[in-house]
Image (spheres, rainbow, N blue to C red):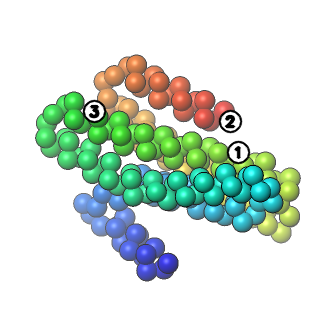
Amino acid sequence: MPESLEKFLGQVATRGSWVGGGSVTALSAALAAALLEKLTLDPHAIRRLRRSRRACVRLIRQDAETFARAIRATRSRNGQVFRRALKAATAVQEQVFHHACAVQAASRQARRTVKPRFQSDLRCALKLATAARESAGILIHTNLAWLDEKAYVSTVRRKLRRAARH
């Protein structure tokens, strides 16, 4: 595990690497879910957290791939290809945003059942989920600014508001 983590961090640190903010955001959500998974007693909540953790791990690689496609599309000077690629990259971060919101909600709910000596880990999980949510939101809004499609932008923003309420 440390070698693969070090390899990932090396990719993040390398100039020109497609592994960047979106992948780090997905990792933050996965870490929050994993930490909370170990603190939670409710079997249903544990299953939901495990699904979020696994989904976010998959989204780490998927973000780098979709972002790379979006960057390559800018070089092609084909606006339609670029918009499609940017929407795909945005959809990845929408998923991260939804998982981060779910982990935040689960963290708040777990406050009542997590023993006092583990509250610090619970607070760390909540902060990681919050950071993932805010980071995903920033990446999404940055992508939306590039798109001149009011209906699409409106739909994405509405989905984010709905996810944030839960």
Q: Position of residue 138 (x, y in %)?
A: 46, 41
In primary-sequence order, the first of circles 2 and 3 is 3
Residue at numbered disc 2 = 166
Q: Secondary structure at mark 3?
A: helix
Q: Which residue is mark 3?
A: 83
> What's the distance in space between the residues labelled 3 and 1, CA to CA?
32 Å
Residue 38 image offset from top left, x and y in percent:
72, 66
Q: Which residue is mark 1?
A: 105
Residue 41: which quarter of the image?
Answer: bottom right
Mark 3 is on which residue type? Arg
Question: From where the camera sits, is residue 134 visible?
Answer: no
Q: Give the crowd class for mark 3: few <14, some 14-19, many >=20 residues within 10 Å.
A: many
C-alpha span from label 2 to label 3 = 29 Å
Q: Secondary structure at mark 2?
A: loop
User: Which is nearer the N-term, disc 3 or disc 1?
Assistant: 3
- Camera-side residue of 28 and 39: 39
